[in-house]
Image (spheres, rainbow, N blue to C red):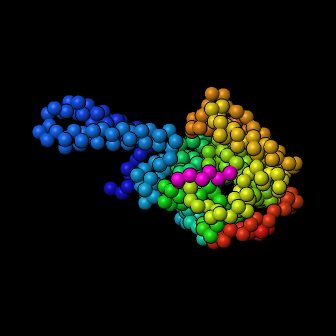
Amino acid sequence: MHLSRIRLDSPITMIIVIAVTLLAIIAVPLFWERWKRKLVGRTATILCAVVGIVVTTGLTGNMIGGFFPTVGSLLGTGVYAADTIDAETSRNGENLDLVRDVGVARAKEGKGTVVHMKVTGRRTKLTRDVTVYLPPQYFEASYQGLKFPAIEWIPNYPSGPEVVTDGYKLPEQLDAAIARHALPPVVVLMPDPTGVPKIGHDTECVDEVNGTANDTYLTADLREWALEKLGVSADRKAWTFAGWSSGGYCAMNLVTRHPQWYGQAVSVSGYDRAQMDAETENLYKGRQDVDDANNVGITVRLHPSPVDILAIWGEKEKFESAAAELIRAGVRSPVRFQSWQVPDAGHNMNTFKSQIPDILTWIGAHTTPPAPAGRKVDTTGGVQPWPLPRTGAVGGLTDTDQ
């Protein structure tokens, strides 16, 4: 059996593991005096019980956080696995037209269509999983010839697009928000910000010094691809970043680093700079200028642009709260910074999921609606890029490269 078919997020798997763990725990006192070779027997039963407890705890955390849906995704050897995909297309969505019949059928039910594919970046040559939500209106005749706004939803580390569709249940939330007119019809890109392997490979969405150009892939590459393949709007105010935890940091960092392309960002439980821990790669290799250029608090002070940022955190999240205040302290006009605190909430997916309806309403109030394709507009709104330091990342953006 392929490792990607062994589910880690299944209640049945959880029940089986709990049952085996309980049996292992019971076996310790039950056989304590019965073993002929007591040292070996006692050691074996204690070890089994401890392993069972560790595995049970890990599975519980995984189900709460929605990190790894399968054993394959955990080990970085599996194929993409998600239960809520309506269609698969070839690399870069070359045969995207084939999903139109599916999209039309779902649109009649007021539902968007979720499509998965591999996308290779023109600049970086990176190939990663990207899941795309196409709203019901994308397949309606009255909307043909319109350019849709876009949201780029960054998953939390160590997750991929699966957590956005399966864990956050975002497609259902998008359908509901569009139906109640809180959000205009919008195309949503859900990329894998990390690639594989994931364990020990936290990239924090930055262009690593002499390493991988994660930022450039998530911004220049995916934006260019979406403009060409999905027909979304090029207007900077039509583009929003959003995410939870590390995805929240990514959202704020990328929108302030590339204000000529993006107008707003929403962060839930995000922070002001890349977190360096055992899971994070050596991103900057001692380069303080690159570190500073990925610090949101520094960017909004030294390179302020007309971007809107919404930062949300739970009442129990002291670190994230402090990070938001550091950003607020650095804000200079024309940056606009809003925030709110979720009462009695901590750093977990339930906090984030509870905020999604309000997040989509906020985005709806700040993004642009679908617009005629032929309308001539200044897509940057006169906003110019600021000089990014050279990182040496393959294909990475530098200076004021667009």
Q: In front here: 9 or 158?
A: 158
Q: Residue 258 lies in magenta, yes or no?
A: no
Assign the magenta stretch its main secondary structure: loop
Q: Position of residue 11 (x, y in %)?
A: 40, 38
Q: Residue furthest left?
A: 36
**Quarter containing the C terminus:** bottom right
**Residue 130 occupies which quadrant of the picture?**
bottom right
Residue 379 higher or lower than 56, as above or below: below
**Residue at position x 37%, y 50% in the image:** 6
Extent of the magenta region: 273-279
Q: In front here: 224 or 384?
A: 384
**Residue at position x 52%, y 42% in the image:** 65
Locate residue 166 relative to residue 285 in the image: left or right: left
**Residue 127 occupies which quadrant of the picture?**
bottom right
Residue 213 in sight here: no
**Quarter containing the N terminus:** bottom left
Locate residue 182 relative to residue 115 in the image: left or right: right
Residue 221 higher or lower than 328, as above or below: below
**Residue at position x 27%, y 36% in the image:** 24
Q: Residue furthest top?
A: 344
Q: Position of residue 215 (x, y in %)?
A: 66, 61
Q: Position of residue 316 (x, y in %)?
A: 63, 32
Residue 305 higher or lower than 9, as above or below: below
